[in-house]
Amino acid sequence: MRFPLKKVAVVAAVAAFAIPLSACSGSGRAGTHSGASGDPAGSQLVGVAMPTKVDQRWIQDGDNVKKQLEAAGYKVDLEYANNDIPTQGQQLETMITKGAKVLIVASIDGGALGQQLDDAKAAGVKVIAYDRLLTGDENVDYYATFDNFKVGVQQANSLLTGLGYLDASGNKTGKTGPWHVELFAGSPDDNNATFFFNGAMSVLKPLIDAGTLVVTSGQTAFNQTAIQGWDPATAKKRMDDLVAKSYADGKTKLDGVLSPYDGLSDGIIASLTAGGFKVGDAGWPVITGQDAEVASVKQLIAGSQYSTIFKDTRDLAKEAVSMTEAVLKGTTPEINDTKSYDNGKKVVPTFLLQPVVVTKDNYQKALIDSGYYTPDQLK
Ligand code: BGC
């Protein structure tokens, strides 16, 4: 959950959010696509289950998927589950009962929907995991996501650039630190969280082992750093504790914080601000993030957050829609990864999109020139 002060900005951003349909794979006319059964697409229902409306990104995801599916001629049941696992399960059951032919699912807890996946299979409904892998069940047909390990690598590298270990081109500057940092990870029930963390640690661990980076708290394991439910308030509380324990006496300077998600960065920033740290001072740390949410891009511009990771939800929606069209036509969707996403029961065929690091130096090109945001949204 984002902090209340962000809500106005988020709502305004979403209201102003323009979704170009240039990426849409459909003809824009209902009833022109045929399903596997020969039904026109216009008579086919697709269920789209999103986790929460609190984060801007999922609203954009839901809007993009719905618009692109409708433009391709499908009926859409788009539901948000308020980050409540039983609600999402119930929503999926209802979609199956209503006759959905495909379920596109961005789960809350990727391992909690086994019953629904089995019910989908029994009803002949295809399942596409959206952004987050569905785990512990074989009834997952395809997975559309970003390269989640790479997201973690990018977060770690941007932390190192912000600290001065790497230059803007990713080359070593020759500075050796040591830098004092703290690490945060995402929600343990989200398969992505370990991918982000493992990606980041593939870069950071050798530097921690070498003493270039010092995690003052000593908390370097996923289970010590994970924030259940991606909850900003929990991240704030953990940062409060870390500051009180290691940094409040002023003897050790906090140089950087690895944060895997803009909402957690909000909690970290709120903690530091309340703890007397001042944005713009030499004592303000480098803080990473993910999702390029409007409020967070403003923080990049203002200097309180160093970086975020942009994952273009228009492209992810396009992938999910083209997978939907393929399974309904009985053809094989385009996939580009058949190894990385073992869900415990099968390796789910996946299409991976590429994430992009955004800082105040390239947000204009990445986010405005690409048409993702308007300049006004970021004022
Ligand atoms: C998504 C991230 C997002 C996080 C919190 C992850 O599964 O991949 O983009 O920041 O959930 O919502």
Image (spheres, grey):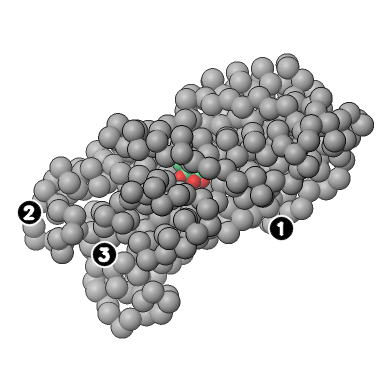
**Which residue is depicted at the point 71% across and 58% down?**
336
What is the spatial separation of the Cα atoms under label 2 and label 3, in whole angstroms?
A: 17 Å
Q: Earlier in the sequence, mark 3 or mark 1?
A: 3
Q: Is the C-beta separation of discs 2 and 3 under 8 Å?
A: no
Residue 120 screen position, x and y as percent: 74, 26
Q: Is the C-beta separation of discs 3 and 1 under 8 Å?
A: no
Toward the viewer: 166 or 28? 28
* Residue 222 appears in the rendering: no
Residue 178 screen position, x and y as percent: 23, 71
Kind of element beneath mark 3:
strand
Q: Earlier in the sequence, mark 2 or mark 3?
A: 3
Q: Which mark is residue 250?
A: none
Residue 349 screen position, x and y as percent: 72, 49
**Viewer-nearest of labels 1 and 2?**
1
What is the spatial separation of the Cα atoms under label 1 and label 2, in whole angstroms?
A: 50 Å
Q: Read off the residue under disc 2.
A: 249
**Which residue is depicted at the point 56% across and 32% down?**
50
What is the spatial separation of the Cα atoms under label 3 and label 1, in whole angstroms?
A: 37 Å
**Vertical comparison of 311 with 274: above or below:** below
**Vertical comparison of 337 with 318: above or below:** below
Three-letter code for the amino acid on which mark 2 is drawn: Asp
Q: Is residue 369 left or right of residue 379?
A: right
**Which residue is depicted at the point 27% across and 79% down?**
175
Toward the viewer: 329 or 345? 329
**Which residue is depicted at the point 39% across and 74% down?**
168
* CB of mark 1 near ligand 1 (< 8 Å): no
Q: Read off the residue under disc 1.
A: 336
**Viewer-nearest of labels 3 and 1?**
1
Q: Residues within 10 Å of mark 1 (few under 14, many from 20)?
A: few
Q: Read off the residue under disc 3.
A: 214
